[in-house]
Image (spheres, rainbow, N blue to C red):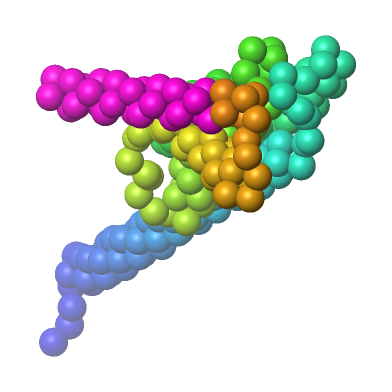
Amino acid sequence: MMIGVGELWNAITSDFGTGLIGALVGGGFTLLGTWLQSRSGDAAAHLAQTRATAQRGVEAATTLAITIQRQTYREHGTFEDREGWGRELMAHQSNLTALLGLLPDDQRDTRDRVLDLLDGVQYWDGREVWEEYRIRTTSYLGEMAAWLVALARGSEPPERRDMTRVVAKRILDHRQGGLEDEREALVMRAEMYELDEEEHERVREIDAALEAIEQERSTLAQNQNQITAS
């Protein structure tokens, strides 16, 4: 049986059309796969960059905390002490601000939180003794590092804490510990020697200071309960 010209043309065009469609579909899937792979690669690179930035932030915060711990300023410091520390602190803060600003918009909550914590690292104006300033500053840096570590690890961020209350409690703990150590030393001395009037007066001052600390703790607890209740 002979095939007509029309039938032959239909067969040819049909096969060609099927092949063309197959080529287009196959090529389309190839392009789609390439696009998805590119997107996946971009996402992985973005995540890696975000975590690397967070890690650098942790290192910068840790460096500043260690620098603070190594300082040996006494009491309220001198003008030169405060000016010298202010210059050093400013350099660290500038570095941290630049690093934290590199965190992407999809990590805005973490970025805003750590920048707020960095604001808690204030200039030492001498109104509080160095040891309490150190406690205040390293508390904020420690909280900042905790948030950045969570981001670097891909973990859930820490629970938000009222750092004003956290710092106040830590400073009270520090004060109480120092006073109790001093009182204990005076008591031990009294067991061996008779305390003079000045030492007896100091014991009374310590007892009054310890009572004041307990009142401050009570006030902090009441304020926290009111916040929780509201």
Q: Nearer the viewer, residue 93 or 221?
A: 221
Image quadrant containing the N terminus: bottom left
Residue at 69 percent across and 13 percent down: it is: 125
* Label tally: 0
Relative to residue 200, is residue 88 drawn left or right?
right
The vertical placement of 75 against 186, above or below, is above
Residue 182, horizontal then vertical, whole percent: 59, 39
Relative to residue 216, is residue 96 drawn left or right?
right
Majority secondary structure of magenta residues: helix
Residue 216, horizontal then vertical, whole percent: 36, 23
Residue 63, horizontal then vertical, whole percent: 71, 43
Image quadrant containing the C terminus: top left
The vertical placement of 49 against 98, above or below, is below
Asked which quadrant contains residue 178, the reply is top right
Relative to residue 24, is residue 92 drawn left or right?
right
Residue at 36 percent across and 33 percent down: it is: 161
Magenta-drawn stretch contains 39: no
Q: Nearer the viewer, residue 94 or 76?
A: 76
Q: Does residue 87 appear in this view?
A: no
Q: Nearer the viewer, residue 120 or 42?
A: 120
Residue at 47 percent across and 56 percent down: it is: 153
Asked which quadrant contains residue 26, the reply is bottom left
Asked which quadrant contains residue 15, the reply is bottom left
Residue 38, horizontal then vertical, whole percent: 49, 54
Residue at 18 percent across and 21 percent down: it is: 226
Q: Which residues are magenta?
A: 202-230
Q: Nearer the viewer, residue 88 or 4?
A: 88
Q: Does residue 8 appear in this view?
A: yes
The vertical placement of 92 against 212, above or below, is below
Farthest residue, direction front: 194
